Image: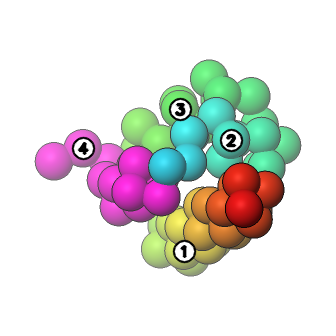
């Protein structure tokens, strides 16, 4: 099992690219990818998962 599977699975399920999450966090894609190599604290994971849900909602409203 790799680190932060919950984040990666949620992004895939919602159709959100990890670079989009990085952009919202104000990080470059490579920095965010490196950040995900180690397990994040639960509160930070929850914040990123909420951000993934927000991005998915924004994408859905734009395509509607």
Q: Earlier in the sequence, mark 4 or mark 1?
A: 4
Q: Earlier in the sequence, mark 3 or mark 1?
A: 3
The range drawn in magenta is 1-14
- How packed mark 1 is, by other alpha carbons closer than 10 Å (few <14, some 14-19, many 20 or more), is some
Mark 2 or 3, which is nearer the eye?
2
Per the image, the residue denoted by label 3 is 33
Q: Quadrant of residue 19?
A: top right
User: Residue at label 1?
Assistant: 46
Disc 3 crowd rating (10 Å Cα; few below 14, some 14-19, many 20+) is some
The Cα atoms of the two marked residues, 4 and 3, are separated by 13 Å
Q: Residue at x 78, y 56 (%)?
A: 62
Task: State which quadrant residue 30 falls in.
Answer: top right
Q: Residues within 10 Å of mark 2 (few under 14, many from 20)?
A: some
Q: Earlier in the sequence, mark 2 or mark 1?
A: 2
The span from disc 3 to disc 1 (Cα, nearest Å) is: 17 Å
Q: Earlier in the sequence, mark 4 or mark 3?
A: 4
Give the CA separation, mark 4 to mark 2.
21 Å
As helix, strand or loop, the secondary structure at mark 2 comes to helix
Task: Identify the residue shown where x is 54% and y is 67%.
Answer: 49
Image point 56% across, 39% down: which residue? 17
């Amino acid at each position: 099992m790799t680190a932060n599977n919950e984040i990666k699975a949620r992004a895939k399920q919602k159709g959100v690219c990890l670079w989009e999450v990085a952009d919202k966090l104000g990080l470059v894609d490579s920095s965010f990818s490196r950040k995900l190599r180690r397990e994040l604290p639960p509160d930070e994971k929850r914040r990123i998962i909420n951000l993934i849900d927000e991005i998915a909602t924004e994408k859905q409203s734009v395509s509607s």
